[in-house]
Image (cartoon, grey):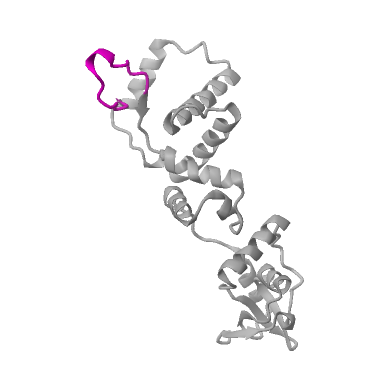
Amino acid sequence: MPQPQLLNIAPHELQANSWNTNFVSPDNEAKLEESIKRNGLFKPVVVREVDGVLEIIGGEHRWQAAVKLGLSEIPVVNLGPIDDKRAKEISVLDNARYGADDTLSFAELLKSMGDANELQSFLPYGDEDLTTIFSSVNIALDDLEIDGNFETSEIEEAPEPPAAKAPKTHTVMRFKLSLRDAERLTALISRTQKAQSFTDADDLTNAGDALVHLLIDQFDVKGLQDQITDRELDTALAEIAE
């Protein structure tokens, strides 16, 4: 393949290919335009030479946004006269992503960039997406640890006068999940919190109430809620501790 050339070219000198499968919703088109307004077109459009024409094989939506915004020139990477098979491979790769974000680190990164309203204006995430991502910082399921005996630790309370010390009512259960399972459970808990209005207590208690609600619903579906005896629970906990 020829050496790629980085050029600045007027958008009207390019043309789209006939096989691009990547669809962008009108809402995300607006976000893409806002992104270009904020940060410029920092990712070049990828093209090839076909019969004297520069055909886009990567970045068609960036190109369309540039045209709509009236940009006189855009950065382009010209790969030269490559064949259809290679062009289609590169087109798919341009839209692909090999990695996956660490949930907690990604949430912290987004929070450092601004609030949800600002981020939604130029990132391809909706309100529900950001709520799920941000909730992982508070719930932090994949950052918890489990010990060998499945013990629980009590929430530490601030010192109180001896005569007014309130009874402890909650514990923090400690367990570890894979990143993928943590993302799924975090999303389920976040949606359940919204649906059942678990919002009156602190974040951990709200998340715990939502998790219990999910589990009870599951027992109800299977008809098991009133069938699990204390002895069966003790046996199950003993098996976990082995």
Quarter of the rendering containing residue 23: bottom right
Whether 156 is among the magenta residues is: yes
Query: Would residue 52 be found to the left or right of residue 132 on screen?
Result: right
What residue is shown at x 37% (from left), y 34% (from top)?
175
What residue is shown at x 44% (from left), y 54% (from top)?
112
Whether 2 is among the magenta residues is: no
Residue at far bottom of view: 52
Given residues 53 and 116, the one toward you in this image is: 116
Residue 31 in the image: state x and y as whole percent: 64, 60
What residue is shown at x 49% (from left), y 24% (from top)?
212
Quarter of the rendering containing residue 155: top left
Residue 36 in the image: state x and y as whole percent: 61, 68
Question: In this rendering, is residue 166 above or below 54?
Answer: above
Residue 50 in the image: state x and y as whole percent: 72, 84
Quarter of the rendering containing residue 223: top right
Given residues 166 and 176, the one toward you in this image is: 166
Q: Is residue 212 visible?
A: yes
Give the position of the N terminus as an image quadrant: bottom right
Q: Look at the magenta stretch and give its main secondary structure.
A: loop
Question: In this rendering, is residue 84 above or below 182?
Answer: below
Q: Which residues are magenta?
A: 153-170
Give the position of the C terminus as an image quadrant: top left
